[in-house]
Image (cartoon, rainbow, N blue to C red):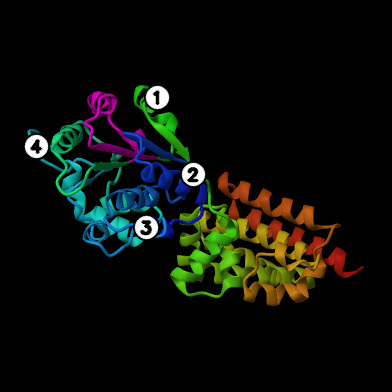
Amino acid sequence: MRFSDILGNEQAVEQVRNMIDADRLPHALLLHGEAGIPKLALARAAAQYLHCTNREGGDSCGHCASCRQHQSFNHTDTFFSFPYVNKSKDSKKPSVCDDFMAEWKDFLTASDVEDYERWLNILKSDNSQPSIMTAESTQIMHKMSMTAYTSRYKVLIMWLPEKMHPQCANKLLKLIEEPYDDCKFILVSDNIKGILGTILSRTQRIEMRLPSVQVIADHLVRRYSIDPQDAMAIAAPAGGNVNTAEHLMEANNELVEFHSQFVELMRAAYVYDTGRLKLWSDTIVDFKREKAQRFLRYAARQVRENFIYNLHMPQLNYLTRQEQQFSSRFAPFINEANVQAMHDELSRAERDIRGNANGRIVLFDLALRMGNLIRSQAKR
């Protein structure tokens, strides 16, 4: 992982680079921010840059022996610690992170941005909550007490220190308070409020920010080879969360289906065909509750996008090519007179479905109300 691979966060990257260049990387650095930000990627890039023997252009070279070891997760002076579930049946030898290294490497290879939900799926944790257990602290203390093998510094990258078991955190506190000269800790947190206060107070913190819509869209274009306009339309509702954008991309078939149902609702509402509207509502009911809620949120966003389309300012619109083709004809029927009411109706229906209301009643009522709102504009 190189600095050039980090999505956005140029300021955080520059801070870390300058620390290493000046040989002032703190013994305990904390990278924190919301989930869906490439914090773990920056920690990995920092360790690779720290160990690189041929830095060039403010980045690791990517081809020296040290860089190649980092890229294959085999660098002898770099260690990882992360939440896991205890699967050992031997109470005298509980599980530690080293028992999950194959899964961890697959997890890091799959995406540039860490995704806790995906890690849970890899662990198959069922109802167990992963944590960094007390046994792991013994492993960490042993590893960090050894002399660096090939580099000047050993680096421990800990993902989600807020999930450390209290006994583990207390055992590591002394090591963080009084580290060996060749030890560097890089902690990566989604929630610094959950970190033991005495550990938190001994770290130097860098807060990372959600990448911009454009940065995420560019990432989607590179990763999935999709059209830039479609990438922008997918990146926009992700709210800066790279994982959400990737999930939306992977669920693209669902978005195509949602668009088809949105078009059907609007066309049936325009002619106020109650038979078609009833069939439409039955179709959405068959989606089941969670999917129906996702559709209603999608429809509310499409109402907003169609209203904005009337402003003839493309830079404000986030529509796929397919969505734009429909909006070019339909958008005039959503304007100042009905846009707020339509959005409110869709939001109310989503709340009612979430609250376990009868879906058939809620959705058919929604369809009829949307018909009234669109027809009121069609008659003008």
Q: How crowded is the residue under tag 1: few (<14 C-alpha within 10 Å), some, or many (20+)? A: few
Residue 53 appears at what percent x and percent y? 26, 55
Residue visible at 68% across and 68% down in the picture: 265
Q: Which mark is residue 115?
A: none
In front: mark 3 or mark 1?
Answer: 3
Residues at discs 3 and 4 in contact (Cβ within 8 Å): no
In the image: residue 378, left or right of residue 187: right
| Visible residue check, residue 295 | no
Which residue: 35% across, 22% down? 198
Three-letter code for the amino acid on which mark 1 is drawn: Ser
Question: Along the line of sight, which residue is nearer the eye, 107 or 183?
Answer: 183
Residue that mark 1 sits on: 201
Front one among 56 and 218: 56
- Say whether residue 257 is left or right of residue 205: right
Task: Report the residue marked by disc 3.
Answer: 2
Q: Mark 4 points at which residue?
A: 93
Q: Which tag is nearer the camera, tag 2 or tag 3?
A: 3
Q: Earlier in the sequence, mark 3 or mark 1?
A: 3
How far apart, in angstroms, are the residues tagged by discs 3 and 1?
29 Å
Q: How crowded is mark 4: few (under 14 residues within 10 Å), some or many (20 or more)?
A: few
